Image (cartoon, helix red, strand yellow):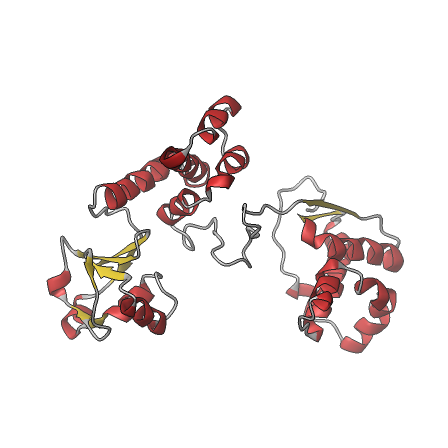
Amino acid sequence: MARARQNAILVDNAEWLLKLNYLDFLRTVGRHMSVNRMLTMDSVKLRLEREQPMSFIEFNYMILQAYDFVELKKRYNCTLQMGGSDQWGNIINGVELGRRMESFELYGLTQPLITTASGAKMGKTAQGAVWLNADMVSPYEYWQYWRNTEDADVGRFLKIFTDLPLDEIARLEALQGAEINDAKKVLATEATALLHGRDEANKAAAAAQATFEQGARSDDLPSFPVSADELAAGLRIAAAFTRAGLVASNGEAKRHIAAGALRVNDEPVKDETATLTAANLIDGAIKLSLGKKKHALLKL
């Protein structure tokens, strides 16, 4: 973060990294980096202890991050780098590099990573990570992300990701059995309201209720376009599920079909070669479902 009177800015480190000459970089930066010290950093040490392979470019990541810190100080008077606790070693390398190269006084601030009860890290590199941008994760999908929270995480996440009063959170986290689902719905709605607004949160909650509890189809489900020409030609079901983002590939769709997990308009898909046509349209849309929790619409 640049310590200045202007608004926060977003910069691209390609501005300085792409101009580096490798030999010059080794002479000016590499001589300040101790391999012995780098090997003690958790990001490297743990990989080596587990005998997991580490490429040369991965090993150099901390050097480049350290150099970024120095450049940010030079260009934008940035003196504080913040990050998760797993970034402590990289940040400290930047603090030390700034002192050795330029006699800069730099600082680092880290906080514990937010993990689920099962120990999984919540981050963009973790499987199933959630994005804040509605173009990446729709308000409905964002709501569903929090609705699917593990039981043991509900109380903690209510405290971290909502503005609810503590006494209300205490009441919700005390719920047992099936009632814990009511607390999850509150978590999902409140977390979604903070990011996307109360109207979008309420729409997502209503769509989920219509889809899961009433067996209906809601137009607030994530939707994707399909043309009349595609339906006239016959759109392969596997391709439709891939387009809707419910599966990563046609091959994955076929595996789910074999397992009986895909449905079109709530009817099981049994033939992996089947196609969607205009006959599948209901009020201008086709409902696609993967299991009980993932749904989307193909809209004409």
Residue 199 position in % (x across, y down)? 34, 36
Q: Is residue 284 visible?
A: yes
User: At 47% across and 51% down in the image, what residue appears?
Assistant: 130
Q: Is residue 60 visible?
A: no
Q: In screen coordinates, is 254 left or right of 10?
A: left
Is residue 161 or residue 135 the one in the foreground? Answer: 161
Q: Quadrant of residue 280?
A: bottom left
User: At 80% across and 48% down in the image, what residue appears?
Assistant: 106
Residue 298 position in % (x across, y down)? 24, 59
Quadrant (top left/top right/bottom left/bottom right) for the C terminus: bottom left
Is residue 299 or residue 163 the one in the foreground? Answer: 163
Q: In screen coordinates, is 214 left or right of 52?
A: left
Residue located farthest toward the top when viewing the structure as drawn: 167
Residue 39 position in % (x across, y down)? 80, 65
Q: In screen coordinates, is 258 left or right of 155?
A: left
User: At 76% across and 52% down in the image, what residue appears?
Assistant: 73
Q: Is residue 178 above or below residue 270?
A: above
Q: Is residue 194 above or below residue 50?
A: above
Q: In screen coordinates, is 11 left or right of 152?
A: right
